[in-house]
C-alpha cells in the first residue's frame, strides 16, 4: 500500500478548489466524473461540489476514528444515539448544515 493514510491527508486539506486541484495532481481524481487525459496537470473532471462533499464526509469519518481511538465517550455520545437495534449518527456543522446516518445492528 503506497499511501496507507491517504484518507487522513484528504480529510485535512483545505476545503477549496485550489487544494482539491493540488490533491488531484498528486493522487488523482475522486473517480466520480470522467477522467481527463493525463498529459499534464489535471483539470478537475469531478464536479467541485463533489470534492467539497467527499472531503467533508471524510473529515467526519476521521473525527469518529480519532474519538474511538482516544476513547472519547463524551464526543461520541454527542454524535451517536445508540439503541437496541442500531445507532444514529448526527452531526451539525459550523455552517448549520447537518449530516445523519443510521447504522443497523444485525439481529
Image: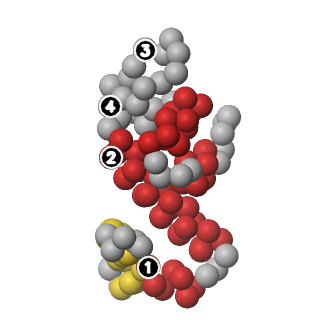
Mark 4 residue crowding within 10 angstroms, few (<14) / some (14–19) / many (20+): few
Question: Viewer-nearest of labels 1 and 4?
Answer: 4
Q: CA distance from mark 2 to mark 1?
A: 24 Å
Q: Quarter holding the N terminus?
A: top right
Going from N to C along the chain, the mark reached first, 3 or 2, is 3
Q: Which residue is mark 4?
A: 33
Camera-side residue: 80 or 104? 80
Q: Which residue is mark 2?
A: 49
Camera-side residue: 97 or 16? 16
Residue located at (32% from left, 38% from top): 47
Residue located at (51% from left, 80% from top): 76
Going from N to C along the chain, the mark reached first, 3 or 1, is 3
Question: Viewer-nearest of labels 2 and 1?
Answer: 2
Q: Is residue 77 above or below residue 5?
A: below
Say whether residue 4 is left or right of residue 73: right
Disc sitting over residue 66 in the figure: none
Q: Which residue is mark 1?
A: 79
Marks 2/1 in contact by CB < 8 Å: the verdict is no
Question: Viewer-nearest of labels 2 and 4?
Answer: 2
Determine whether the residue tagged by mark 1 lies in a helix, strand or loop.
Answer: helix
Say whether residue 4 is left or right of residue 28: right
Residue located at (53% from left, 69% from top): 64
Determine whether the residue tagged by mark 4 lies in a helix, strand or loop.
Answer: loop
The picture places residue 6, in percent across and down from the top left corner, at: 61, 45
Say whether residue 29 is left or right of residue 90: right
Marks 3/2 in contact by CB < 8 Å: the verdict is no
Is residue 48 among what the camera can see? yes
Amino acid at each position: 500500500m503506497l499511501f496507507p493514510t491517504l484518507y487522513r491527508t484528504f480529510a485535512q486539506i483545505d476545503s477549496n478548489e485550489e487544494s482539491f486541484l493540488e490533491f488531484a495532481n498528486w493522487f488523482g481524481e475522486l473517480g466520480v466524473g470522467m477522467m481527463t487525459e493525463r498529459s499534464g496537470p489535471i483539470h478537475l473532471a469531478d464536479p467541485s461540489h463533489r470534492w467539497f462533499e467527499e472531503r467533508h464526509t471524510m473529515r467526519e469519518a476521521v473525527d469518529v476514528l480519532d474519538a474511538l481511538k482516544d476513547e472519547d465517550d463524551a464526543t461520541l455520545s454527542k454524535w451517536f444515539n445508540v439503541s437496541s437495534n442500531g445507532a444514529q449518527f448526527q452531526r451539525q456543522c459550523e455552517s448549520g448544515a447537518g449530516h445523519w446516518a443510521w447504522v443497523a445492528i444485525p439481529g
